[in-house]
Amino acid sequence: PTRKMPPSASAMDFFQLFVPDNVLKSMVVQTNMYAKKFQERFGSDGAWVEVTLAEMKAFLGYVISTSVSHCESVLSIWSSGFYSNRSLALAMSQARFEKILKYFHVVAFRSSQATHGLYKVQPFLDSLQGSFEAAFRPSQTQVLHEPLIDEDPVFVATCTERELRKRKKRKFSLWVRQCSSTGFIVQIYVHLKEGGGPDSLDALKNKPQLHGMVARSLCRSAAGKNYIIFTGPSITSLTLFEEFEKQEIYCCGLLSSRKSDCTGLPPSMLTNPATPPARGQHQIKMKGNMSLICWYNKGHFRFLTNAYSPVQQGVIIKRRSGEVPCPLAVEAFAAHLSYICRYDDKYSRYFISHKPSKTWQQVFWFAISIAVNNAYILYKMSDAYHVKRYSRAQFGERLVRELLGLEDMSPAH
Ligand SMILES: *[C@@H]1O[C@H](CO)[C@@H](O)[C@H](O)[C@H]1NC(C)=O
Ligand SMILES: *[C@@H]1O[C@H](CO)[C@@H](O)[C@H](O)[C@H]1NC(C)=O
């Protein structure tokens, strides 16, 4: 963390490192402006009064509460069903919440930008990005990947195939650059899949090409910092890694002959030999600082890296078969990958489950979910954690109550 937070810092204080009052105030202004324009066009809405900053916080709090309760409709809070929550419901009427939901906007409409499908949320994403970078310096090792954002892993494991198929397809994919020793998400990239206007990447049917573009975008602010970036097969490519090396960004990626762009790599290293080598054996080919490693462990695994010396030895420890020797690059890759899986297990279940139909709003709530997870990660590294030791779920509940104004926020408590 770049700044020290006091032991008395609240969940809200951590959240507001990323979504400060001035950003919330601009949501207030934009929502009121949109409501005005809407009524000028479609007739006045007698029940509407301008939204205030306190109400905007409560509005966010209600939607964020679905990340803890996992209910799919935020309106259930006011229902009499399983997800009803009287103590939350009392802070605002359902009718008022629905009015704010109807007019909710975060960015001013400008027809000149309307060609870009995310124009209704991009300036917010940019400000969030800036605050992520200002609040935290990531470790040297980072991962580029698509986090599991749609549901918590428990849901995926228990719901039927049909239930999964019935859910609406997302119109965008979300990619992140993530610090692999804390899980803090340093940078977000949203790719619109369709209807994104002329700027959309749809023309890029070629996946590695698209993923190369995603990677360049996610590493825009990573140049010259001596980072080591881990990548999956769809991103790993010699061209991209060489381009990154010029910017002093070093890489270690898994390669697959099916999913990766293998341009420039020696074909002899990409085909499996007729008789498999012994377990833990590897072959290396080098060009400059780049090495292509083919390692055998009941299957051929190929890695491309310029971040580790291929002659340095590492080891993979398997519960059943014990130690399997490997180059250090392979050990490092496995360690960082398993870190990210643990992050997905631990934090993906705290993504907001309320799903609006508009794509820009879905993107907005995913970004807010990431902001809350990042806030918790900073909280855990701060002195404030030693006071109350909130779990991620408790931190979420606490934040909701603070946003709703249900907690005494005076510094004396
Ligand atoms: C290898 O890396 C070093 C620094 O890490 C750099 O100075 C050198 O130019 C690189 N060599 C090649 C062939 O890219
Ligand atoms: C209502 O929601 C709050 C905040 O998420 C939570 O702390 C509380 O346990 C919930 N109450 C009930 C009855 O579910």
Image (spheres, helix red, strand yellow):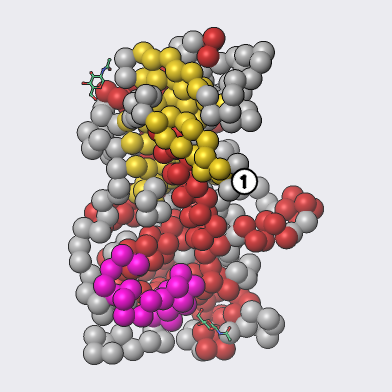
Q: Is residue 150 left or right of residue 394?
A: right
Within-10-Å neighbours for mark 1: few <14, some 14–19, many 20+ = few
Determine if the magenta segment contains residue 391.
yes
Above or below residue 110? Residue 268 is above
User: Which residue is painted at 38% across and 24% down in the image?
Assistant: 310
The image quarter containing residue 217 is top left
Task: Name which residue lies at 38% across and 76% down.
Answer: 389
- Reply above or below: 31 against 142: below
Q: Give the residue at mark 1.
A: 320
Question: Where is ligand 2, by quadrant?
Answer: bottom right
Q: Nearer the viewer, residue 413 or 116?
A: 413
x and y percentages locating residue 328 in the rendered image: 40, 33
Mostly what secondary structure, the magenta segment?
A: helix
Query: In the image, what residue occupies the spot 56% across and 38% down?
Result: 193
Q: Quadrant of the C terminus?
A: bottom left
Label 1 CB, ligand 1: below 8 Å?
A: no
Q: Nearer the viewer, residue 240 or 405?
A: 240
Amino acid type for the residue under numbered disc 1:
Arg
Which stretch did the figure color magenta?
A: 380-404
Q: Is residue 361 visible?
A: no
Q: Is residue 276 visible?
A: yes
Q: Secondary structure at mark 1?
A: loop
167 left or right of 137?
A: right
Q: Residue at x 30, y 31 (%)?
A: 249
Task: Please identify the quadrant where the N terminus is shown.
Answer: bottom left
Could you tell me residue 88's position as x and y percent? 51, 84
**Farthest-out residue, left:** 3
Relative to the observer, which residue lies in front, 236 or 22? 236
